[in-house]
Image (tube, rainbow, N blue to C red):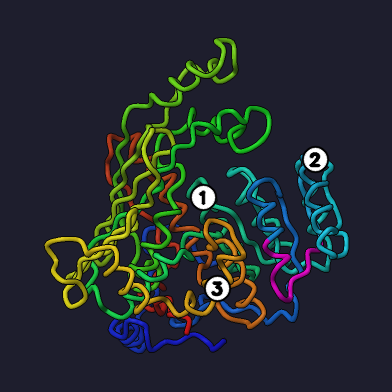
Amino acid sequence: MSQLDLQSVSRRDFIRGAAIAGMGLALSRIGTPHTAAAAAPRAAELFRAPKLERVRAAFIGVGARGGGHVEQMLTLEGVDVVAIADNHPPTLNAAVAHVEKKGRPKPAAYGDGEYAYRKMLERDDIDIVIIATPWEWHTKMCVDAMKAGKHAFTEVPAAITVDECWELVDTAEKTKRHCMMMENCNYGREELFCLNIVRLGLLGELLHGEAAYIHELRSQMNEVNHGTGSWRTYHYAKYNGNLYPTHGLGPVAQYMDINRGDRFDYLSSVGSPAMGRELFAKAKFPPDHKWNQIKQWNCADINTTIIKTARGRSLMVQWDETSPRPYSRHNLIQGTKGTFAGFPNRLACEGLTKNTHEWTEKEELEAIMKKYEHPLFVKMGELAKKGGGHGGMDWLMLWRIVYCLRNGEPLDQDVYDAAAWSAVGPLSKKSVANRSASVDVPDFTRGRWEVRPPLPIVS
């Protein structure tokens, strides 16, 4: 497979960035008291780690999500599963046994308490650590992994406070290790198609985006003693904001060149009443159940956050894991020439569709999508579907990670993306708590967003 094709990049943005760099523009520290933990790279440089002949992987947390990562990594060429840490013995033992059943050497197991993973990180035969644990552990484990000399890959969100976002950035810059939040939705067919038509300029100048994670997940409350519901439910009770912003936000942020020509400037957030979880608890559990002992459910059933970017674009982000409402990530991107929207997929675009007064018909849209399919999906789409994980996006994400690591390429998502996308969560809480007042979004790139090249199209 060839290297990254920069011909598909928005040339205006790239040339603009180069011009700014050529004038010797000082890299500002916009909206943050933090100073660089390490010398900032030259304007157009993106972080590359030395090539890995083989990727020696360790895992922290191998339940439903992490277990899927183990299974899919075993299908990738050049990957060794070296060690696994999980403080739930049945889950840990099942994951170790699965690796052996696939004909691989038995991975070392670490399960003696919540911090057993730190003993695993002392090993010198681990290159990367994949983290799939409760949210409050993500930053801590990423930082520990990077300080131990490993590249860190974490489930979403990467952080749940702004301070944690900065800790990830500072540690990655200081240790010179990758820190990627594994936003799998960036590797869906529709999202890759959108990225491609945006880069080709078919939608014109971008104006507005809409992103969401609307997914009715009240049934997770049945996971009382172990599993996602056993810990995530307490977040719904305690905090009020968008607690899980990145599934819809990540792809739209890439369309808009966030951190690579534009950045989130400020946001404002509102929430509905918090009713669904309490009603579900009363209907499904006895009065003395621990869910019915929660005195107040604070998190709105649906949160809506509006973001303004430095280049003046608008972005709506919604989150709802409670309401009886069909699944959607919105995935809408609007430009001066047309608009694509997801769930279901729709397109109206000058020069592509019959008119712009109505959404294109399904058959016409499919023909357009095939014509402008993202080259990565053309090459790897069928393998991704076989590899599995949310229609293949999980497998394709992991394949792409391994490809970049083995070829010394920059990752498609970096620590600045992990910080900016995750920060929408805690900043939305701050806005909601202050009558939806606007809140500044820190510039985690420390000014480099103006000169960093847009994410290219893999050819």
The answer to the question of whether label 1 and label 3 lie on touching residues, with beta carbons closer than 8 A, is no
For label 2, the SS is helix
Q: Is residue 72 above or below residue 368?
A: above
Q: Give the residue number, with chain letter if any, for mark 2.
A: 90
Which disc is residue 163 wearing? 1
Q: Nearer the viewer, residue 256 or 226?
A: 226
Give the labeled residue for mark 3: 411
Q: Which residues are magenta?
A: 72-82
First of labels 1, 3 by sequence position: 1
Identify the image quadrant of residue 374.
Answer: bottom left
Query: Upstream in the sequence, badge 2 or badge 3?
Result: 2
**Residue at 43%, 80% in the rendered image:** 457
Where residue 174 sits, quadrant-wise, is bottom right
Q: Amino acid at mark 3?
A: Leu
Q: The disc labelled 2 sits on which kind of residue?
A: Pro
Tell which of 355 and 143 is nearer to you.
355
The answer to if 415 sits in the magenta stretch is no
